[in-house]
Amino acid sequence: MGITATHPVNRKRRAGPWRPALLVILRLLVLVLALLASAPSTPVAAQQPPPSPTFDLNQVTPPGEPPAGRFGQSIYLENCAPCHGEQGLGDGPTAANLPSPPTAFADLNAVWERSPAELFHTTKFGRIERLMPPWQNELNDRQIWQVVAYAWSLHTDPDTVAMGEDLYALSCAGCHGESGAGDGPDAEGDLPNFGDLTYAMARSQADWLAGWQEAHAGIGGDWSQDDQRRVLEYIRTFSYVPAWESGYRPGPGVVRGQVVQGTPGAAALEPRAVTLEAFADFQPVATFTTTTDATGAFTFSDLAVDPSVVYLASVGYDGIRYSSPIIELSEEAPAAETTLTVYETTGDPSGIRIDRAHWIIDFQPGALLVGQIVSFGSSGDRTYVGQHVEGVGAPVTVAVETPPGATQVTLDNGALGQRFHQVGNLIYDTAPLIPGEATKQLILRYTLPYDGDSLQLSQPFRYPVRSINLLVAELPGLQATVAGLEEGPAQEFEGRRYLLWQGAGLPAESTVQLSLSGLMPAGATDPRTGTGASAIGATAASITFAPWMAWLTGGLAAVALAGVLLWSWRAGRVQTSSRAQDLARQRDELIRHIARLDDLHALGELDQESWQSQRAQLKARLLEVSLRLSDSTA
């Protein structure tokens, strides 16, 4: 078995999602209530909150292994970014409400005199006088060390560390050794081991610089301050793994599986290569390969069982890639089994159907903002590879239709002219369709301008539709009628109200007719926000598409992915941007929704079974998006 650990190239840090501050506020509220409950009943002078525990190195448990920043990224973004900022600038959305500014981890000077142990202590025990909650009841020590490693990474970058490595090799490694263990060929006396986690966690960068200048001021004495600090940043990597590196470590995990033929009567499968990819925070961190035996069985061993890591197995057959569901390992359950089913191919489209269709409509003055999520499946036992149509150079498999006049058409899974092709009002997909339920998903968005204040809209469906949901954002004075679907109760989510229609069992070539009047004409002011055509950004920013979450809590999991449409209009309208940027925004939105799902579960509004099921669906979608993002930036 071979392994390749991936190390992403140096990229500008992206803004990531964070967990809403709700749980932080609740924790502080509980603390305040506890203080009030213990207060004397007679009036007393106002008291300050109790002071936070004074830093005590004896209260800090050294990490068992160098903590990996990559594994602490999601913890930081969900729990720390609301105050400290997504990029560690101290500018999170709740920072302005704090009694003093939160630490800006992106500022080297803010951590220069603070050791990792001090950051750990503050994270674990809190600083309640500054409204910093103690996280010891939410995170274990290992998780706290991981988030400290991520926060530490925010003030440096790969280039800085690489330059420090060159300087260290030139002037320091002779004594301190290549790995900082103090065992270089020129070593004299008892030198510190920079990789000793107990030693390293207790020293700040300032401590190390002072020790350096005291022991041998002549070495590096002619370097600039920046160069000295670069060397120290490299030395720090002996005791932690920066967030831009994989951080993946082997463990006792095992994944066993079987590649099987799903087409009856097909020839027996020959041994073939199987790939297992490891993801941490939905970014690839390691890739393994092995070969099946004569029975199609395969095994991957020595795998990490860190709960931050998930796996995806895949195999190629007849030019098509087939993947497993998400595989999770843990210390309690370090082994898992999976099956990879492959199929023969066909050019017969007769088994195509739409398992789920979701149609979401919102408004801005003079235009509709339309999103569709269409999940295709096939009742056949072969993978449909498509047929040729006029105007497209490659065989096409499925098609969706946009109304005449639709503009700014974008698709989540690929670009027009590449995987997708537009001929007239039809958007064709060229990717194969695998047998089974909802094996292909298209996310389509477009703007539909209109004149006046009314519009007639038709949506044809070329294939049988098993279920469909239509959500229309409510607008003062709006009149909407739908032919072909049944009206359901209006839904209200996060201050926005949506009209609802549903249908099931629509035959092929069905058409849903939507009539709208009372729309905002071009140049009008949006009564929901008080903004007009010149301030469309404010209108679009209010489109949260949170209904998918409330529907989940009500058991209507069919629209669980509707929220991914939000990012398309964050700037006010659908705009063409690079594929990587689109995928990154969608990934961030999905992570935000997963965090909100966790909040609902933590607040008791979602039972354990529903939470696990819905979280698995969103994680599967998120992993799919992350794979495409990795491909688009390769």
Image (cartoon, rainbow, N blue to C red):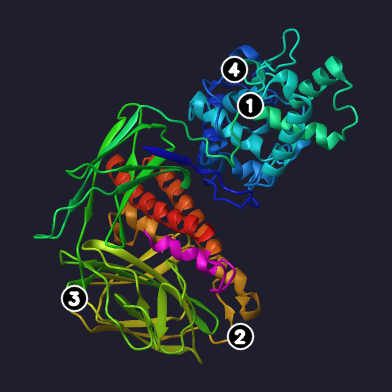
Mark 3 vs mark 2, foreground winner is: 3
Whole-number angstrom distance, CA of label 3 to CA of label 2:
49 Å
Is 599 displayed left or right of 291 in the figure?
right
Q: Residue at x 18, y 52 (%)?
A: 269
Asked whether residue 325 appears in the rendered view, the answer is no
Whole-number angstrom distance, CA of label 4 to CA of label 3:
65 Å
Indicate which disc residue 238 carries. 1
Q: Secondary structure at mark 1?
A: loop
Residue kind at label 1, given as amino acid type: Phe
Label 1: few (<14), some or many (≥20) within 10 Å?
some
Instruction: State the extent of the magenta-drawn residues as a range.
Output: 561-579
Q: Earlier in the sequence, mark 4 or mark 3?
A: 4
Indicate which disc residue 348 carries. 3
Indicate which disc residue 523 carries. 2
Q: Secondary structure at mark 3?
A: loop
Q: Earlier in the sequence, mark 3 or mark 1?
A: 1
Q: Position of residue 135 (x, y in %)?
A: 54, 29
Q: Secondary structure at mark 2?
A: loop
Residue kind at label 3, given as amino acid type: Asp
Label 4 belongs to which residue? Answer: 60
Q: Nearer the viewer, residue 57 or 191?
A: 191
Mark 4 vs mark 1, foreground winner is: 1
Mark 4 vs mark 3, foreground winner is: 3
Mark 1 vs mark 2, foreground winner is: 1
